[in-house]
Amino acid sequence: MAGMARPDTDSARSVTDPYTLHNDVSLAVHNTLRVRARARQLAELKDASRLPELLDKLDAPPLVLGQGSNVLFTGDVAGAILVMGTRGVQVEETGDGACVTVAAGESWDGFVRWSLAQGFAGLENLTLIPGTVGAAPIQNIGAYGVEIAEFVERVEVWDVRERRAMILDKAACAFSYRDSLFKREPDRYIVIAVRFLLPRVQPLRLEYAGVRQELARMNVAEPTPRSVAEAVRALRRRKLPDPAVIGNAGSFFKNPLVPAAQAAELKRAYPDMMQWPAPDEQVKLSAGWLIEACGFKGMREGDAGISERHALVLVNYGHASGEQLWALAKSVIHGVQSRFDVTLEPEPRIIS
Ligand code: FAD
Ligand code: EPU
């Protein structure tokens, strides 16, 4: 995997600073919505063993960032930002797969591509999700019918409150749809590394709408994990705007979960409304459908907009401030609430 080396063989690392620390730093390159906020302090950690020392040098407990692909800064940050820039992977073979421990700062998609090249299976539906490995457990990233919770064995963290390193097993992480312990206790845990259990053989997951059709279009008769990844990449490139071209944070809203009775009532009133069964007698609605039905898709206020390609994606056409983007998001929430009596929640972390 590009950029990924085992810590004990990474000779370049020994000549690199274990961390850097700067004052009054622009966050424009640290968030994919391209908001031009600033932070009073910004540290980047390269060597995880020096984290406690670095934390002591910061004015306040930091806000941790990976690649900033799921955050919205609504103003400047008065405190410190800690960017996880650690690298490394360790592989322990088991009989039919491996335990793979990956440093928080590694690229998520780099790791997925590396795992497929090594002959592991399971992560193929999760290809092309931006961000770092350390951020992946925060919202239990998911796509095309798979969530990382299935493959996480444990998460190595620094507990900021207790000032000690800890290992949280999967149950302790309390993963659910776009949620986890980490999301519920923001700023308490700094993810240092994630340990995955990766199988060599795993049934393919082709049920998500569009995957089989994409494989057929590619003339793939006998799909493999690598061809499924290719199909998912093609689907994602078609559906979602590229943050390198236009600022965005992927889905800006979570798909809402509502009680089954409310879903049934909505279905009677709107027979073409998208709905999927969810745990605990709830039903998942399509936030994209709800937003499009309210007429917000493709709308624009100054440089803040709702993507023409996908109604769930808030976009920055250039110079929108975090406040302007958040104001537009709130008008979408209000519109959906008034029309459908359904409350949309933002997916990214709103940092004010
Ligand atoms: P950041 O945005 O830097 O941080 C996100 C949150 O995690 C913040 O609360 C931050 O404080 C916290 N955090 C980050 N690193 C750490 C750490 N080491 N320790 C503790 N806390 C930490 N998400 C999906 O689930 N599925 C998708 O299909 C998907 N598609 C996307 C498509 C696009 C085009 C974009 C821009 C985003 C998409 N996302 C998707 C959202 C995003 O990719 C994920 O949430 C990703 O995990 C964020 O990684 P990051 O490193 O950029 O995290
Ligand atoms: N839809 C619309 N209008 C739109 C977009 C979607 O009506 O503009 C409806 C369509 O009916 C479509 C359905 O919504 O069939 C589902 O759309 P899509 O497959 O794009 O999935 P999604 O529910 O909108 C979720 C995740 C994505 C993830 C995809 C694929 C959330 C909040 N979003 O989107 O994750 O990539 O499924 O699994 O769960 C992210 O979290 O940032 C993200 C991009």
Image (cartoon, rainbow, N blue to C red):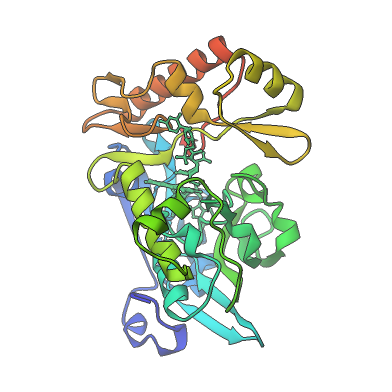
The front one of 347 and 123 is 123
At 64% from the left and 20% from the top, the residue drawn is 267
Where is the N terminus found, in terms of image quarters? Answer: bottom left
Q: Position of residue 239 (x, y in %)?
A: 35, 42
User: Which residue of the protein is positioned furthest toward the top in this rendering?
Assistant: 338
Q: Is residue 83 above or below residue 330?
A: below
Task: Give the total number of marks visible in the rendering.
Answer: 0
Using the image as rendered, state which of residue 285 and residue 222 is in the foreground.
222
User: Viewer-proximal residue, 110 or 64?
Assistant: 110
Q: Quadrant of residue 303?
A: top left
Does 282 sit left or right of 214 as displayed? right
Q: Is residue 128 visible?
A: no
Residue 23 at x, y percent in the picture = 32, 50
Up the image or down, 64 lies above or below 272; here it is below
Q: Residue at x 66, y 88 (%)?
A: 95
Tell me, yes or no, if residue 228 can be seen here: yes
Relative to 44, does residue 96 appear above or below in the rendering? below
Name which quarter of the figure residue 304 lies in.
Answer: top left
Furthest-right residue in view?
A: 280
Q: x and y percent of residue 266 in the render?
A: 64, 18
Residue located at (63% from left, 44% from top): 177
Q: Nearer the viewer, residue 218 or 130?
A: 218
Q: Position of residue 45 (x, y in %)?
A: 42, 65
